[in-house]
Amino acid sequence: MMINKAQIQQIVVVGDAYVSPHTLEKAAADLDCPQAKIDVLQWGSGDRDEFSEMQTAIEHKGPDAAPYPSELDTLIETADVLMVHFCPLPAHLLRRAKRLKLVGVCRGGVDNIAVDALTEQKIPLVNIIRNAEAVAEFTLGLMLAETRNIARSHRLLMQGVWPSEFPNSEYTATLKNMTVGIAGLGNIGALLAKKLSALGVRVLGFDAYLPQQVIKTLPVEPVKTLEALFKESDVISLHLRLTPENEGMIGAELLGSMNPTAYLINAARAGLIDEAALVQALKTHTIAGAALDVFNDEPLKADSPLLTLDNVTLTPHIAGDTVDAIALSPYPLAQAMREVLEQGRRVFTTNSDAR
């Protein structure tokens, strides 16, 4: 579907605590629609704790789980283009759109968008993996921090303790002599595979949705099932999108199939893991350890059992938090949206059925 740029009269941008409305406004100007009025809104108060609460609600329950700016109730009827970061766009709002031609979200996940409602109306949705590089780097850091006791060494030294023994002292090994299994070979998983391969690490890969011809282009040894990946790997790194079908699927059975010297790394979505089962596996040393950047409750509650364990590395959902990954993400989004406007079609349009 070709979109006539000359018909775009109104662009609505919605910033938040992490992506400023001003940056989105400047990026909207890069769409090269000089005749268009740009309306600028803020989602939430700008407080990051409030943002985190709303983000968690949306990730678990979808775009109806948090309120959107009230101004959208009016602007949705006249907007030609919407650009957002995490502002929810529920179906009942999008179905009232009369002129909407294109929606852009400057993040990889689209759980804040009622994608089906856009597809029904043949409205393309464009998103970008703004922080794939940042998350892949951070995940590699989590692996090293947990397997080589970097984080817990630091904590003990700050407490005045010079440690000589760790929970994994009997089998601490270099990453190069381990096998890393990557569950999910999308943008982040693929980048991580390349980084590990460059370090000489043996990498196994599983992705139930990616075509085999694409997997064959990556530096991984494909395995046919998730169960095989868990059994054969010394380190498992999760890079799966959370869906109703896979929520909590990393439970007692899969964890029990891992080697007792193996580690679980999660910088993807907390909901992939049955947290109670993971805590039990860590307590009983069914697995060697875990490194987690995401949690079902964020901020992590003071009474979380994870905080009582000595074989886990925890970070506060910061894998993608770099100044060039989030704050500046509207600019690559605008570039991707401009391709849709100027070329009509784009490989990376999220809901290809709408084109």
Image (cartoon, rainbow, N blue to C red):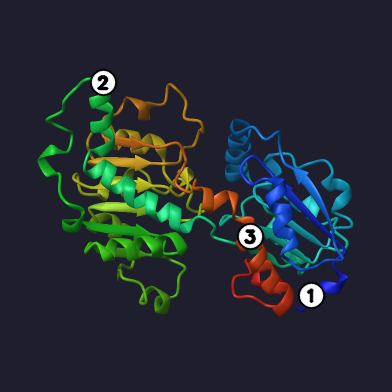
* Residue bearing the label numbered 3: 331
Mark sitting earlier along the chain (2/1)? 1
Label of residue 108 in the image: none
- Cα gap from disc 2 to disc 3, whole angstroms: 44 Å
Residue 111's spot in the image, x, y percent?
61, 51
Instruction: Looking at the image, tell me whether mark 3 or mark 1 is earlier in sequence order.
Output: 1
Query: In the rendered structure, which amino acid carries the disc numbered 2?
Result: Gln
| Residue matched to label 2 | 159
Q: Nearer the viewer, mark 2 or mark 3?
A: 3
Identify which amino acid the numbered label 3 is placed on: Tyr
Q: Which percent across, then down, holds residue 137?
A: 38, 53
Specify few, some or many for label 1: CA neighbours under 10 Å numbering under 14, 14-19, or 20 or more.
some
Pointer 2 with pointer 3, Cβ within 8 A: no
Q: Choose the circle earlier in sequence order: 2 or 3.
A: 2
At 23% from the left and 40% from the top, the residue drawn is: 286
* Mark 2, other Cα within 10 Å: few <14 / some 14–19 / many ≥20: few
Res. 3 mark: 1
Disc 2 vs disc 1: which is toward the camera? 2
User: Mark 2 to mark 1: distance in Å?
Assistant: 61 Å
In the rendered image, the quadrant that contains the C terminus is: bottom right
Q: Is residue 117 in view?
A: no
Say which residue appears at 79% left-offset and 48% top-offset: 40
Tell whether 300 sits left or right of 255: right
Residue 146 as seen in the image, left or right of residue 352: left
